[in-house]
Image (cartoon, helix red, strand yellow):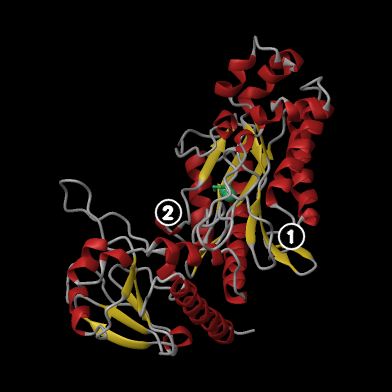
Amino acid sequence: MAHEELFARHFESMTGRYADAIGSLSRDKILIDAVLIHSGSEGVYFADDQHMPFRSFAHFLQWLPVDRPDQMILFQPGKKPTYFQVVPKDFWYEQSVVVEEWWAQHFDIVPLSSADEVIDQLPPLRRIAFLGESTGFAATLGLPSSLHNEPRLRSFLDYHRAVKTEYEVERIREASVLGVDGHRAAREKFEKAGSEWDIHMAFLETCRITEFESPYPNIVALDEKGAILHYQNRRTASGRGSKVLLIDAGCRVAGYCSDITRTYTRDGASPVFKALIDGVEKIELGLVPEVKAGRPYPELHAEAHRRIAALLRDTGLCTASVEEMVTTNITNLFFPHGLGHLLGIQVHDVGGHFKDDTGALAPPPDEYKYLRLTRPIEVGMVFTIEPGFYFIPTLLDAERESDKGKALNWKLIDELTPLGGIRIEDNILVTNDGARNLTRGAS
Ligand code: GLY
Ligand code: MN
Ligand code: MN
């Protein structure tokens, strides 16, 4: 289906959702006449005149793919939404906004040359809720402070953002296709002994993006750096002596993200480490068919731990039984993060810990405190599945003399630690009959 049609349906869902939010809140006596969604204000660094990179607020981007500060949408039930398009008269920066008919036709577009001018354009309604970071700006417009980021309104919208429209799924899929191309180039650069910097640049160049356009800073880790979960540096030294690459990198399309991780070895890497990569990949792919609407996502996470435990046993890294490893949390030493998270306009999309759309929380259990998704799986959700297996000295060293540590093969651990870690990550759409992997077979 063409973008135009997909967006038209997405737009219809959005207007329906906002109307539902207002209706739902009114039943609890929170009365809202309209919602003004602000993309955000541009920041400068402290005591400096240089602007920080800007990214629009996700609830704004869900309406419009415009990554510019001070843009606003006014939603009023039953009316065509207004897009206040602020284009300052300025000759220092490019200020124009690219307007594309496929989305523009759904809005009344009101051009303004400064955000303040919006005050003369707002309808004479008393209860305009404001969504956005710049609540000081909302106050200057006279919008009631009790409706600045009203928690119930935000919870409702955050909760429902987990289930994607077809338009959103298509954008994430496109971001995945692009990311897969970048990963291919990155792998080739690694095979030619590229440095972390070379591999990072190969990814960006192939995707034709600058670093700032990435959904999150690329993680390009050779060898031991792979054990730093969000490793942020890009060493320029040749990768000639390196054996392992862990690369976690994605793309954005119209604001929607992909989030993809691969781990590769070069000749000469330890066969046990290679077996671990194969094992983690098998766990990742094997969990996709386990995705079923209605199943709590934490069950998948717990299943991943059981499979990681079996891998520890099969590779001779741990002599304890699978059940023992899981109950004593030995697997947490090697797989300390969550199995995955919601994915959308934010790479860690919001709402993963919500129990319902009122904002009640379902926090993760103590033993899996980093799990970002505790909700039951629903058709239309997009999330990642990303099991990992790392040799993290700060976690492991604490167990060298402990009871738990007695079952571990320290000689093998010490041999594998310089190779860092493994993560395999794909982007998964929940369907009526299971799941679709948007990353594999995407191009
Ligand atoms: N790229 C960060 C993550 O995988 O969650
Ligand atoms: Mn992820
Ligand atoms: Mn990732």
For label 1, count other residues whose C-alpha is less than 10 Å away and answer few (under 14), some (14-19) or many (20+).
Answer: few
Which residue is situated farthest in the top direction here?
Answer: 401
- Where residue 294 is drawn, which disc sits there? 1
Q: Position of residue 324 (x, y in %)?
A: 79, 25
For label 2, count other residues whose C-alpha is less than 10 Å away and answer few (under 14), some (14-19) or many (20+).
Answer: some
Say which label, 1 or 2, has the lower sequence index: 2
Q: Quadrant of residue 166?
A: bottom right
Q: Observer-nearest residue: 276 or 245?
A: 276
Q: Quadrant of residue 175?
A: bottom right
Amino acid bearing label 1: Gly
Q: SS for tag 1?
A: loop
- Where residue 343 is drawn, which disc sits there? none
Q: Position of residue 368 (x, y in %)?
A: 62, 37
Please give the name of the residue rendered at 30% of the width and 76% of the height, measured from the top-left corner: 127
Q: Quadrant of residue 85?
A: bottom left
Q: Position of residue 291 (x, y in %)?
A: 76, 56
Q: Observer-nearest residue: 121 or 335?
A: 121
Please give the name of the residue rendered at 50% of the width and 66% of the height, measured from the top-left corner: 156
Quarter the N terminus occupies: bottom right
Q: Is residue 318 left or right of residue 61?
A: right
Q: Which residue is mark 2?
A: 211
